Image (spheres, rainbow, N blue to C red):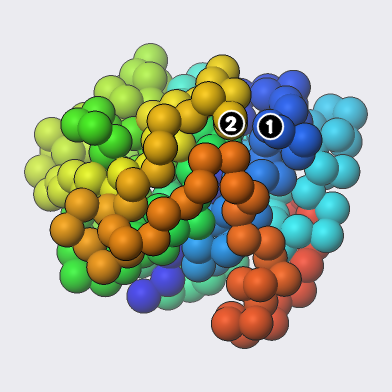
């Protein structure tokens, strides 16, 4: 069982927008890596090279977007295709809009663990009853994703994949970062309370506390080359 993270940004400016002192895609990539996602793919235009610079030293593949005519669903499928080329036995992908910069590594880990017992299901993280991001999409749903109309926006895309017959499961993970995006300052986030009914509920993530760094995560995971490279396919 392997779960990738696909970080999507419609523009280079959004990808490198400040998120409490870090470029957005770098903060997300570090959280994804610390939470156990591998590989990590960023899908974004990068005409000036600023996105690649922001990812320097991170274990991330920077991919050119799909043709614009394919719409947001095409960008999601593009990221999954790149991730599958990196890891052939991939079973799931975290679809992660780049504006959702405050998601904690604990949430990534919880979604990956839940995928282990529901590998064919779309997993949606909730906070106070509101569905959020990243959404874990099983690789088996890729063809359903490819069939979504190009004018559909991200929330509706997931709805359409589920409507095609893919099972869905909501997880109350108690992480305000899944619904509060970059427009909310990190210090203004509601409290993190942890998964409801889950073994991580007792962990309290202090509001404004730093996410675990990749150095800490590396002590518990196999070594992997660090790179911030462009991959054109």
Q: Are marks 2 and 1 in contact (CB under 8 Å)?
A: yes
Tag nearer the camera, 2 or 1? 2
Q: Depth check: 223 or 83 in front?
A: 223
Instruction: Please report whichever mark, 2 or 1, sits nearer to the chain's N-terminal start.
Output: 1
- Quarter placement of the N terminus: bottom left
- The structure residue drawn at horizontal position 19% and vertical position 31%, both measured from the top left corner, is 129
Q: Is residue 27 above or below residue 222?
A: above
Residue shown at the point (32%, 62%) measured from the top left? 202
197 sits to left or right of 53: left
**Residue placed most toward the observer, 202 or 77:** 202
Which residue is tagged 1? 19
Q: Is residue 29 left or right of residue 74?
A: right
Question: Circle 2: is it few (<14), some (14-19), or many (20+) Cα within 10 Å?
Answer: some
Circle 2 residue: 186
Left or right: 120 in relation to 66? left
Residue shown at the point (59%, 40%) measured from the top left? 208
Residue 192 drawn at (x, y percent): 40, 43
């Amino acid at each position: 069982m392997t779960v990738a993270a696909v970080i999507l940004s419609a523009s280079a400016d959004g990808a490198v927008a400040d998120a409490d002192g870090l470029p957005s895609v770098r903060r997300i990539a570090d959280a994804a890596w610390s939470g156990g996602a591998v590989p990590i793919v960023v899908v974004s235009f990068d005409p000036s090279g600023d996105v690649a610079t922001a990812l320097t030293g991170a274990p991330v593949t920077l991919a050119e977007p799909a043709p614009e005519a394919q719409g947001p669903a095409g960008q999601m499928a593009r990221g999954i295709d790149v991730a599958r080329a990196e890891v052939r036995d991939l079973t799931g992908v975290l679809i992660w809009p780049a504006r959702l910069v405050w998601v904690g590594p604990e949430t990534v880990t919880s979604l990956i663990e839940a995928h282990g017992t529901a590998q064919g299901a779309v997993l949606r993280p909730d906070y106070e009853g509101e569905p959020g991001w990243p959404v874990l999409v099983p690789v088996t749903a890729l063809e359903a994703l490819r069939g979504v109309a190009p004018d559909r926006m991200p929330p509706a895309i997931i709805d359409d994949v589920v409507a095609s017959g893919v099972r869905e499961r909501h997880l109350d993970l108690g992480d305000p970062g899944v619904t509060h995006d970059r427009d909310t300052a990190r210090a203004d986030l509601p409290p993190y309370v942890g998964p409801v009914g889950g073994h991580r509920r007792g962990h309290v993530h202090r509001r404004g506390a730093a996410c675990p760094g990749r150095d800490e995560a590396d002590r518990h995971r196999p070594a992997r080359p660090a790179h911030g490279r462009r991959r054109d396919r």
